[in-house]
Amino acid sequence: MFHFPALSLVLLPCLALAWSGAVRAEAPAPPPDVSARVAAVAPQVREWRRDIHSHPELANEERRTATLVAAHLRRLGFDEVRTGVGRTGVVGLLRGARPGAILALRADMDALPIREATGLPFASQATGLFDGHEVPVMHGCGHDAHTAMLMGAATVLAGMRDRISGTIMFIFQPAEEGGPPNMVSGARAMLADGLFAREKPSAILALHVEPGPVGQIQVRPGPFLAGSTDLSIDLTGRQTHAGRPWEGTDLINLSADIVKSLTTISARRLDLVAYPNVISVGSLKAGLRKNILPGTAEMRGIIRTFDQDQQASIQALIRTSIDGLAQSYGAQARVSFTDSTPVTRNDPKLLDSLMPALRAAAGVAGVDPNSRLRGAAEDFSFLEQEIPGLYYILGSTPAGIDPAQAPTNHSDRFDIDEAVLPVGVTAHVLSALAFLDAHHAP
Ligand SMILES: [Zn+2]
Ligand SMILES: [Zn+2]
């Protein structure tokens, strides 16, 4: 049962830390029965991770992955397995021996249009169709690890039904990264497809691998990941000869003023002490040649914040500023805000109640409960619009590499230390058990 690879996966990071002198004598540990079950499934989790890694699928194309997941849940004797939820999502229900609350655990399954350059023996050779173009595909955000870890947690928890009060909903979500423009992300698609229509969990938990000390859990109460909104500005005016700008509207000059005004809003009109924010224009298109002042111009950008109210006031300030500038040039401006992803935040009470479980899972690597804010956005936030959520980061930088120098998520060289896999399985298992124990039926 405890053959060597399983033991080495679990023990190596602990030994490495012990040798570095960072070990704390009182480091919490999982109960022995959970440790034994996780150790037993760890080699399989690593195999799943490698298999999924070498067969990555783009958003909404996760058919092979979904088939693998659904077959696994059925083999485990899950009470219900639903497929095709929100296109390719899989939902499994595992009922415990006693009644109680429902808790959801979520993993994302999609890969990215990236040509892999890790040089791993199981590196991706796959291609896929993105927006009508054939592109290389890679698990460059670690969703292969997320899927494998939640499959491992399913194995462990299915073997512990006697110990479970209530129901665990396993959500394998497609398209977290979003698909081509105009396609809603996987969380929204699953919700629209009735994810919580029949059974509404009391809470939902998810984790994400990221560069950091192996097995360290990083989390914080309240806002954690940014909310994101797309910004579109379309300008129209009167086209004219560049030598006679007074006969038309100089949209090039106006565009420059608008870009400057947006960064001024960010730096001068908003409370940066309360919450940071970013407004960026990433695309500016205007004009064809040097001696024509164009009659149209367009700008596309993003707004990132950590506070929903701040998002609303930013939008109001942007409208006021652009309307004023356009008027001063005699031009018309159309401003729109679309594709808004809410802030991903951690319910403070939920985090508090699950902190012992997270500490036990992280062991000597520990939990950082006041981790920094992250500028990335997550569609997990849509699930949190329905029920309280907890989202935490699992440090996963391969041993011997400085996390600050490690290729980050979405890099073509992003990789994880597989020693993190049993830590993630343990975190899922312990947090699910802790939540259901605290919410069991009277
Ligand atoms: Zn990503
Ligand atoms: Zn991701």
Image (cartoon, rainbow, N blue to C red):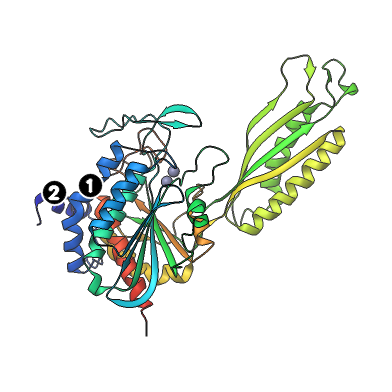
- Identify the residue under disc 1: 46
Residue 327: quarter of image: top right
Which of 306/387 is in front?
A: 387
Distance from disc 2 to disc 1, alpha carbons, whole Å, reads 10 Å
Find residue 431 and report its horizontal and vertical position in percent: 33, 66
Amino acid found under the numbered disc labelled 1: Arg
**Apparent side of residue 110 relative to residue 430 in the rendered image (left or right):** right
Between 243 and 283, the residue placed more toward the observer is 283
Residue closer to the observer: 170 or 384? 170
Q: Residues within 10 Å of mark 1 (few under 14, many from 20)?
A: many
Q: Name the residue rendered at 51%, 32% in the picture.
A: 131
Considering depth in this image, is 299 or 88 the residue closer to the camera?
88
Would residue 407 be visible to someone looking at this image?
Answer: yes
x and y percentages locating residue 228 in the rendered image: 58, 48
Whether tag 2 and tag 1 are in contact, CB under 8 A, the answer is yes
> Is 378 rendered above or below residue 241?
below
Q: Vertical placement of 386 versus 412: above or below?
A: below
Neighbourhood count class around disc 2 (C-alpha, 10 Å): few under 14, some 14–19, many 20 upward: few
What SS does tag 1 mark? helix
Which residue is under mark 2?
Answer: 5
- Amino acid type, callout 2: Pro
* Whether residue 224 is visible: no
Identify which residue is drawn at 37% across, 81% down. Answer: 441
Quadrant showing the C terminus: bottom left
Q: Is residue 138 above or below residue 373?
A: above
Query: Which residue lies at the image location 56% right of the left edge and 38% below the top edge?
Result: 181
